Amino acid sequence: MIAKAANRLLSSAAPIAVLALLAACSAEPGATPSEAGAPDAPSGDRTAARPDSGAAEQTGAIDPANWPHFDPLPLDPEIEARVDEILATMTLEQKVGQVIQADSGSVTPEDVRTYHLGSVLSGGNSAPGPLPYADADTWLEAADAYYQASLDQEGVEVAIPIIWGIDAVHGHANLRGAVVFPHNIGLGAARNPDLIEDIARVTARELSVSGHDWTFAPTLAVPQDDRWGRAYEGFSESPDIVADYADRIVYGLQGHYGEDDFMGTGSVISSAKHYLGDGGTTDGRDQGDARTSEADLRDIHGAGYFTAIPAGVQTVMASFSSYWGTRMHGHEALLTDVLKEQMGFTGFVVGDWNGHGQIEGCTPTDCPEALNAGLDMYMAPDSWRGLYESTLEHARSGRIPMERLDDAVRRILRVKLAAGIFERGLPSGRPLAGDTSILGSDAHRALARQAVRESLVLLKNEDRLLPLDTGLDVLVVGDADSISQAAGGWTLSWQGGGYENSEFPNGQTILDGIRETVEAGGGSVRFAPDGSDAAGADVVIAVYGEPPYAEFQGDRDHVDFTPDGFDPAVLAGFGERGIPVVSVFLSGRPLWTNPEINASDAFVAAWLPGSEGGGIADLLFDGGDGYDFTGRLSFSWPRTALQATQNVGQPDYDPLFAYGYGLSYGDDGDVGLLPEESGLDESDLAPADSYFVQGQAVPPWTLMMQTGQSLVPVIALPEETGALLLSAVDRTSQEDSLHLAWSAPGDTLRIETSEPADIARQSNGAMELTFMARAEADTPVEIGMSCTRETCDAFLPLTVNGGDWQEYRISLACFADHGVQMSDVDSAFILRPVTGSGAVDIGAIRLETDLDGARNCAG
């Protein structure tokens, strides 16, 4: 193994803007309602002079000379010689297998053996067994089977072991009993690189218990729009914090490149993601298009990679997103010219979940363009078999040059050898494997509790209410008794939420943390989830916020907090009775919460704290431990519900609470009465991915009726066209739904748009077209979708059952399977009668998360 890492400094030819990014300067934190909690800008702050986008730069062109140059880290000569030996023996089939990664929910050990696959991943819902998560023994049994199959191969000179990857993004949260740390948005508020490295090290150890080799972390996004459903996966809107954390996470997961601890016991391969610009897409749309300048792409979104790559990160994951219309999975200038050549990255680039299939001209099962652009390993969860066959043909024909295929395989082998995968043996026989005493150990839980404490940001503390005395009679209301709610998405399952506390055997709820602290101090705690039973209470602690979500299913059209479950409107009643209120707000992003802040005497941004709820009690109460609030905002807090893109360093920066704001006990915590006008109108209030709610089509969608080739917009009800009669009907409120009657089949009710919508990500992500309907008697109809191309429509049969309102769901993938191009949808909902006459009522037409994971194509 090499002795030390080589020169990791930027070359003197690095562009001035990048040198400025990495140099020390200072910044003012900006105006806030109270300056008491706004710290001086830290040394090394690179946010003050946000790079000027410059209209002339906004072309999408990339010049590698504008990017920092890193000398490649020195390669181990023994490993390189071994790679040469293995490559010389490999069959073409082996080489193609190595560049493909399949999901454990869609591939068997026998498949790994037959196709020589290089890697297996487990997506957020793909654990072995009946659940989306598993215990250590179940993981290890599957890991052994895959590993053994990769070595048990006939007709090859050298068998190449697989590596198994998983998204352990805030702890190993698909392993029952593992510690669940706060999500990155909270860790960014902690501003503690030492803590971050320790968390990464613990995560790697707990991954070793289940036999995993590789985690898809760290996420190095710099979210610029809080509407993005992955905002909580980013540490900050500022590149400073991301750059300060990136290398430390790599060290925690892998050890130090070139030193004795590199890939040692309890270490795993890390993956910097999502390269590049995922946090800068237009309107914060997940998998969207970043149309920013090259300078901003580099200085804002590239900052984390400029420390992760010199730290020796072994893999980089390509982003689903595009840069000026070119998908990152196929962006040769950024994957090859910048990342590999200019920045000297010698590991391998892995794709994201069928992301290669979104490249123009590609499908999930056929995409030579991605490999040729610089992708080294396709993430082909359920498409791997077809992709293997097409890639093999392209390699034989020369469409994928052998030089490019060999380079990809070389990079994969280099990482596997450096990680010791060839020598480690069966996962169950490795150090730490199966040692469940590591999970939730006292040290690991203490670290998680520290992380919770340091991530909390106190936004309001009127009359210095906090810290509370432990001898009080405390009423706790809201969601305090749910670890699942506090942990958010990527917890036990992809979307998270809904799990009993018993599924977190090494965790503690916020409620239990409060009860433990208060009762130790002589006080008492009552819990009333709905806010009742306040008589005699000295203080109310209300725990509430966003429901769990992940990726695009968390995309929003605005940043207004919309209660889902506990209704914080009840808080005002406590104030009227003279009972002080402390709000603990759980969210994956800053949200407009002025009414809730006004109804609270103290307001804590708790983000998504994970499985150690006691860390919140540590700061709400004076338990004698000397703790205080030290968390400071790493994301600006919005002044209105439309202020989703307010980022420090921008012109006209004017948030409600600025980047860097946060109170401690001794600060003046009064923020005054905040305005309660959100800035939204009625059309803004419709939930995301809604088409028809409260009696109205949601813009840009329009209600239409079609007879033959004639389309008639519905201006007012009732409306009669051809054989259709449309009128309003009540479901839960006045005229919130539609009554459709017909006298002959053939004509259709449609929800159309002149601006075709891209819902491919929703289709790929197993979302469903969902609506409420009823009929007097069982009534068969057809439900359809269409796109702008000719013959690009599909209809699926459905029977609306006679009786009361019922919810109906059809998987979007069913429409895609029948020919609808989901990236170009112009009719999101079509209802076509198939009987001679009949009638149905219909409303609440929207997209929703798949509840059961089963594809449903017919009613």
Image: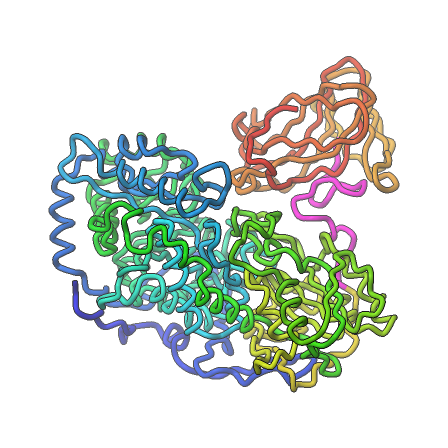
Give the residues in magenta: 678-704
Which residue is situated farthest in the top direction here?
836
Q: Is residue 392 left or right of residue 712?
A: left
Residue drawn at (34%, 41%) of the image: 101
Q: Is residue 820 above or below residue 381?
A: above
Q: Nearer the viewer, residue 71 or 435?
A: 435
Q: Quadrant of the C terminus?
A: top right
Q: Nearer the viewer, residue 579 or 852?
A: 579
**Where is residue 118, by image quadrant?**
top left
Residue drawn at (39%, 65%) of the image: 249
Q: Is residue 474 above or below residue 817?
A: below
Q: How is colour applied across the structure in the image?
A: rainbow
Q: Is 203 part of what is drawn in magenta?
A: no
Residue drawn at (45%, 65%) of the image: 444
Q: Nearer the viewer, residue 702 or 798?
A: 798
Q: Is residue 622 left or right of residue 323?
A: right
Q: Is residue 95 left or right of residue 582?
A: left
Q: Picture coordinates of residue 186 (x, y %)?
A: 54, 67
Q: Picture coordinates of residue 424 (x, y %)?
A: 23, 51
Q: Quadrant of the N terminus?
A: bottom left
Residue drawn at (47%, 63%) of the image: 293
Judge whether residue 236 can be spotted in this image.
Answer: no
Judge whether residue 472 can be spotted in this image.
Answer: yes
Q: Picture coordinates of residue 223 (x, y %)?
A: 52, 62
Q: Is residue 505 above or below residue 781?
A: below
Q: Is 686 part of what is drawn in magenta?
A: yes
Q: Picture coordinates of residue 322 (x, y %)?
A: 46, 51
